[in-house]
Amino acid sequence: QVQLVESGGGLVQPGGSLRLACAAPEGYRDYYAMAWFRQAPAKEREGVACIKRNDGRAYYGKSSQGRFTISRDNAKSMIFLDLTSARREDTAVYYCAIRLGPADEDIFSRLWVSTYDYWGQGTQVTVSS
């Protein structure tokens, strides 16, 4: 079991910016990639972005390209998600996830929920004036 802890959620105004953080256990290095997903009310969970631990290669979901940036800090076993130009439709619970084993690049880039092994509890992001 790998515990993931998300932080940084809250209320942001339309057009504003927000940074989310996700921490794996301190010193934990035995994983392939981490990712961010989100789930809005009455909608399916969707992939926002993912990033590999070794080379930092990142992929983004179709609805998140251009306004989201994923990054990592391997020394702290953390990833981050920066949101800019926030829109009301970005309102959702944002989840951090971790994949332990390697994956084919095509599979990894598709951000499928089923390909991740452990999940955080989620952090609420609300975009509203």
Image (spheres, rainbow, N blue to C red):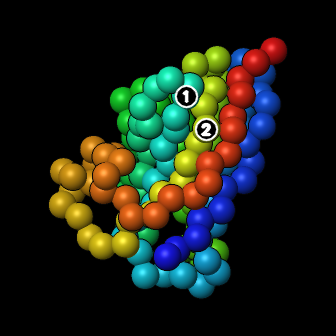
Helix, strand or loop for disc 2: strand
Mark 2 vs 1: CB contact within 8 A: yes
User: Where is mark 1, residue-wise?
Assistant: 40
* Residue 82, quarter of the rendered image: top right
Amino acid at circle 1:
Ala
Residue toward you, 51 or 89: 89
Quadrant (top left/top right/bottom left/bottom right) for the C terminus: top right
* Left or right position of 115 against 87: left
For label 1, the SS is: loop
Residue 107 visible:
yes
Question: Which residue lies at the image location 27% right of the left edge and 44% below the top edge?
Answer: 110
Q: Position of residue 30 (x, y in %)?
A: 43, 82
Q: CA distance from mark 2 to mark 1?
A: 6 Å
> Relative to residue 107, is residue 66 drawn left or right?
right
Reply above or below: 34 against 38: below
- Quadrant assignment, res 57: bottom left
Whether residue 60 is situated above or below residue 26 in the rendered picture: above
In the rendered structure, the answer to whether residue 127 lies left or right of residue 100 reads right
Q: Position of residue 75 (x, y in %)?
A: 60, 78
Number of other residues with Cα within 10 Å of mark 1, as a class: few under 14, some 14 to 19, many 20 or more: some
Picture disc at residue 93: 2
Hey, what amino acid is under mark 2? Val
Q: Which badge, 2 or 1, comes first in the chain's sequence?
A: 1
At 52% from the left and 34% from the top, the residue drawn is: 39
The furthest residue to the front: 42
Q: Is residue 85 visible?
A: no
Q: Is 5 above or below relative to 48?
A: below
* Residue 128, image x, y percentages: 76, 18
Q: Which residue corresponds to the image point at 63% horizontal and 26% vertical from the top-left?
A: 91
Disc sitting over residue 119 in the figure: none
Residue 86, relative to residue 56: is it above or below?
A: above
Q: Badge 2: few (under 14), some or many (20 or more) residues near its Cα, within 10 Å?
A: some
